[in-house]
Amino acid sequence: MSRRFRIASILGALILCQATCIAPLASAATSNMSNYLLALQQLPVGWSSTSSSPSSPMGCLGNLMEPSGVKQTGSAQVTFQSSSGNALINEKAATYLNTTKAYSEITANLQHCRTIKTARSGHVLTGTVAAMSFPAVGQASKAFQVTLHFEVQTLAESLVIARVGNVILGIDYGGLPGYSLTQFEGITKVAVSDAEKASRGGGKSTPVVTQPSKAPQSISFKDLNGNPYIVTEMSVIDPAKGADQFTLPNAGNRFVAVKVKVTDTGSKQISDDANLNMTIVGSDGQTYSADFSNVLGCTNFDSGSYHLSSQQSSVGCVVFQVPVKVKVSDVEWSPSGGFGSSFGTWKVG
């Protein structure tokens, strides 16, 4: 048996597929459960949709999404496979007669399931289950790491169970150890965001462009070498939308982008970093530093850096993460990351 085939056969036993695995979107279609699931175009390049077939229960992980004593009223599922065949993403959305009880039972079963032992193709498959640190999503969520051993091969699975309204999501990412947890976090945020929008009827937020309280103002600065330049605050985009489906703020935060134009007014070339120079002050009195994310409609200079010849200008956005209940009151600029000889502030209306 080839190494790739062995990996694919083990991954066929993804946690969410235990005994209840179904073909993509085959269940509860009439209740629009598919609206709660990821679509292929939301994933990075190199993934494709695939079907899953039922597999025998994997020890204490059997029937994970429909534990004993909990009635599932609807479900839908989708599975994606990497182009290498060495990784799978499986997502299941389900509704219950009692969603709170279902979430408690599912997560409790995972917390009590410490070791796994089952047979696959005449061979013994063993594994361990442990809670893992993961950003909170939805109304409630818990994450688990599963390690599987099959012959000489070791595979890892990360699983998030999240409650979104009256729906429970199970999002499972399995592959060779060392796969990108950062990518899994991004995929999970997108999946939960989709479910939240579906629970609200699919409404989408629209970025609001807020101009400064006065007409755009230019402030003069000097860099460490005494070279003069001006910065013009053009607008504040609040909230700003991430550049792609996987660029999302942390739970409880939003993106805010400040658009500025930097102009070299001297006779020599200047170079600096807008991400280091700009901070914002919130209505809570806290100062926020740049987040380094990219947003739609405005680039972050050259990852924050700009290099200008005499009389040349460059326009870009500096992006921040701000708590959803905090308003932006001031935009501050300090050349050379605070080591320059000047400082400027714009009030935000």
Image: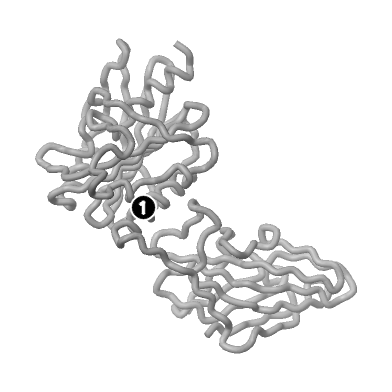
Residue type indicated by callout 1: Val
Q: Is residue 12 visible?
A: yes
Quadrant containing the N terminus in the rendered view: top left
Q: Position of residue 349 (x, y in %)?
A: 52, 85
> Above or below — where is 122 with respect to 98?
above
Is 71 or 3 nearer to us in this picture? 71
Q: Position of residue 312 (x, y in %)?
A: 82, 70
Looking at the image, residue 122 sits to the left or right of residue 301; the answer is left
Q: What is the residue that sits farthest to the front in this orientation?
A: 30
Name the foreground residue: 49 vs 15: 49
Mark 1, Cα crowd under 10 Å, few <14 / some 14-19 / many 20+, is many
Left or right? Give the position of 15 relative to 332: left
**Residue at image point 46% right, 49% down:** 186
For the point 21% across and 42% down, the residue is 106
View extreme (left): residue: 69
Q: Which residue has dot 1 on it?
A: 192
| Residue under the point 36% across and 30% down | 51
Give residue 204's quadrant in the image: bottom left
Q: Secondary structure at mark 1?
A: helix
